[in-house]
Amino acid sequence: MTDYYQHTPKYAKLSFARQTWVESEGHAAKTATLFGVNMNVLRVDVIVSNPTANPTVTVTFANADGVAVIDGTNFATLAKNTKHIKLARKATADFTEVPLVGDITVTIDPSLDSGATSLTVDVILYGD
């Protein structure tokens, strides 16, 4: 069986701006919006840095009307110091493959302050 993702470079890649919480900034959720999206999302990478505290991160995806467009079950309480790769096409999918059209807002919500060092989170969508 051919690995579906071995040809990832031929897919469109949409990267959200990096979100960072500096020490003593608090941990209020931050959002980034990608305008005019038109793709089937097949893979989502969430890269969480390694701050001194132990926050987890929850990521949600919503359309312009505020409706969740990707099931957030597997995007909750993501651990620090990890690259989380979530796939739509595998035997036990992490989320349902979804066509995204229009403006998409990604909300990143850390569970607590980062401690003495910053928390940085990148969210990258891959699709066709």
Image (cartoon, helix red, strand yellow):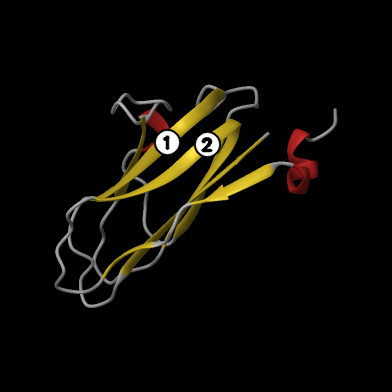
Q: Outermost residue, right direction?
A: 1
- Residue 37 position, x and y percent, is 52, 36
Q: Which residue sits at x=23%, y=66%?
A: 114
Amino acid tagged 1? Asp
Q: In which image quadrant can residue 115 be found?
A: bottom left
Q: Earlier in the sequence, mark 1 or mark 2?
A: 2
Q: Give percent across and percent down for residue 110.
A: 25, 52
* Position of residue 15 in the picture relative to residue 61 (left or right): right
Q: Is 12 on the left or on the right of 68, as rendered?
A: right
Query: Residue 2: x, y in percent?
Result: 85, 32
**Residue marked by disc 1:** 103
| Secondary structure of residue under mark 2 | strand
Category of crowding for the residue at label 1, using alpha-carbon neighbours closer than 10 angstroms: few (below 14), some (14–19), many (at least 20): some
Determine which quarter of the picture holds residue 127: top right
Q: Is residue 58 above or below residue 16?
A: above
Image quadrant where one finds the C terminus = top right
The residue pinned by badge 2 equals 37
Spatial CA span between label 1 and label 2: 6 Å
Whether pointer 1 and pointer 2 mark residues with C-beta atoms closer than 8 Å, the reply is yes
Numbered tag placed on residue 128 in the rendering: none
**Relative to residue 44, is residue 47 depicted above or below?**
below
